[in-house]
């Protein structure tokens, strides 16, 4: 959730500032870019050098760089951030934030920020309980700022009680979960299939196809990025998912894939059937390796079950089913035929006549056709971008 996020971390004057070092480390490790802004007091608790080394960026605490007189532009910093976190947020800084008082760079950045602002207070228990502090917190929450509540335990004063800043691990988890909850597909279960299927002939041979799995894996990644709970049923492929949250189930044959899809489809809000499923499979699989002879060799094949059509027949109200059609001629006519025959909500058409589309390549060129026969054609794009276009349409269909 934090990958690539631009985070302004505001550090206030509190003994808990020593935990900011771990917080920076964890945020950077999670893939975020972290810009630390300290209040002048905070620099008495932890050195800017520590935080700039860990964040790999200069740390700002003054409006001007003393050496050059250059301005640390608070407006730019506020607009740069996707997220602002104040940790530790001292009683003093929270009071300023609640009243709009600006007397240092951090409070100026706060007033300039347009992004969500999280604050993790740290103070002694009596300060925390004080009506002024509680009033300020209510004000801050009223402005839309998000409180990361303090924990209880031994405080720097030696007293026990509430007021300890949340641990850095808790702050990172809180942030990631809060960001996830606001994503468009949060709470949606989505089943994706990817890759080819292999239909065994004997213990060493199979009938397969050229599908690389790239499109299906790109779709699973994009759906996870949009907050969905993704189950990815994958045929034999060397692809790997970007996100650990994706539940991957490896299968080999069309029959295996059917079994997994039947198990996961009932609970799914949507299914994107991207796999290149074999249409035929050998009637019998030889137990031993078939030896070669001087004469020709025939394999008798039987039809596999059409997984998509089976799911289309079972589909409940509100479930969205997306299929793919890879065609070489009469592209739109065939794609619409599949959309209707298989009871789909959306079909992704790609034509092998378009250079750069289809199997193996890193790019694809698709046309999306929905059940009202609305048609959108896209340019040739990389598969991650194509996945994004498909997911935008899928998100709209799920909202209907
Ligand atoms: N599909 C499926 N089960 C099968 C065959 C295909 O679920 N046994 C799905 C594919 O995953 C794809 C869609 O059906 O989403 C269309 O697949 P495609 O191979 O283009 O079409 P078919 O229906 O198999 O028809 P044909 O091969 O004759 O074009």
Image: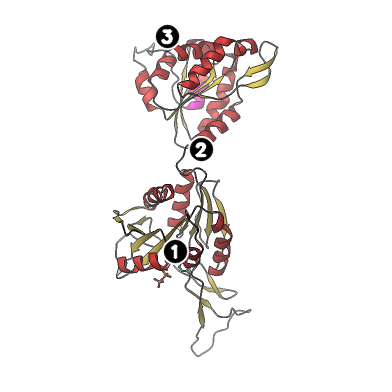
Cα–Cα gap, marks 1 and 3: 61 Å
- The verdict on residue 258 being magenta is no
Determine which residue is flagged by label 1. 211
Q: Which of marks 3 and 2 is nearer the N terminus?
A: 3
Q: Is mark 1 on a helix, strand or loop?
A: loop
Compared with 44, 3 (above or below) is below
Query: With 339 as the anchor, is 176 left or right in this view?
Result: right
15 and 292: which one is in front?
15
Q: Which residue occupies the extreme front position in the image?
A: 317
Disc 1 versus disc 3: nearer the observer: 3
Q: Is mark 3 on a helix, strand or loop?
A: loop
Which label number is shown at residue 181? Answer: 2
Disc 2 versus disc 1: nearer the observer: 2
Q: Which of marks 2 and 1 is nearer the N terminus?
A: 2
Q: Does the residue labelled 3 lie within 8 Å of ligand 1?
A: no
Cα–Cα gap, marks 3 and 2: 34 Å
| Residue 179 seen by the camera | yes
Q: What main secondary structure does the magenta stretch of the protein show?
A: loop
- The verdict on residue 52 being magenta is yes
Looking at the rendering, the stretch of residues picked out in magenta corresponds to 51-64
Q: How crowded is mark 2: few (under 14 residues within 10 Å), some or many (20 or more)?
A: some
Q: Does the residue labelled 1 lie within 8 Å of ligand 1?
A: no
Q: Residues within 10 Å of mark 1 (few under 14, many from 20)?
A: many
Residue name at image x 57 percent, y 59 percent: 250
Which label number is shown at residue 103? Answer: 3
């Amino acid at each position: 959730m934090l990958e690539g996020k631009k985070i302004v971390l505001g550090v206030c004057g509190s003994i808990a500032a020593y935990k900011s070092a771990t917080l920076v480390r964890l945020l950077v490790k999670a893939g975020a870019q972290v810009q630390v802004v300290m209040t002048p007091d905070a620099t008495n608790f932890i050195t800017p050098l520590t935080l700039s080394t860990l964040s790999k960026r200069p740390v700002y605490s003054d409006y001007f760089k003393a050496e050059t007189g250059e301005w640390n532009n608070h407006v730019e910093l506020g607009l740069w951030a996707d997220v602002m976190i104040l940790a530790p947020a001292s009683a003093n800084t929270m009071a300023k934030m609640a009243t709009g008082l600006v007397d240092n760079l951090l409070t100026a950045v706060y007033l300039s920020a347009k992004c969500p602002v999280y604050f993790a207070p740290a103070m002694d228990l009596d300060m925390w309980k004080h009506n002024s502090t509680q009033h300020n917190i209510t004000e801050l929450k009223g402005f839309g700022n998000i409180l990361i509540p303090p924990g209880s335990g031994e405080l720097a004063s030696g007293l026990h009680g509430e007021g300890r800043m949340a641990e850095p691990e808790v702050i990172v988890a809180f942030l990631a979960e809060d960001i996830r909850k606001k994503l468009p597909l949060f709470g949606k279960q989505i089943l994706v299939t990817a890759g080819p299927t292999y239909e065994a002939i004997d213990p060493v041979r199979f009938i397969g196809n050229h599908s690389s799995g790239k499109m299906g894996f790109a779709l699973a990644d994009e759906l996870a990025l949009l907050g969905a709970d993704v189950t990815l049923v994958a045929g034999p492929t060397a692809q790997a998912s970007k996100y650990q949250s994706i539940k991957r189930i490896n299968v080999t044959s069309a029959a295996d894939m059917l079994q997994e899809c039947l198990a996961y489809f009932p609970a799914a809000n949507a299914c994107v059937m991207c796999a290149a499923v074999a249409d035929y499979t050998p009637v019998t699989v030889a137990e031993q390796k078939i030896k070669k002879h001087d004469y020709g060799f025939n394999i008798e094949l039987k039809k596999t079950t059409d997984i998509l059509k089976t799911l289309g027949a079972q589909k409940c109200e509100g479930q969205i089913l997306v299929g793919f059609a890879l065609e070489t001629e009469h592209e739109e006519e065939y794609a619409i035929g599949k959309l209707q025959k298989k009871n789909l909500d959306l079909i992704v058409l790609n034509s092998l006549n378009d250079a750069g589309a289809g199997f193996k390549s890193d790019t694809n060129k698709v046309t999306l056709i929905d059940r009202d026969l609305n048609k959108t054609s896209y340019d040739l794009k990389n598969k991650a971008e194509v996945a994004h276009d498909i997911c935008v349409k899928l998100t709209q269909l799920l909202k209907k």
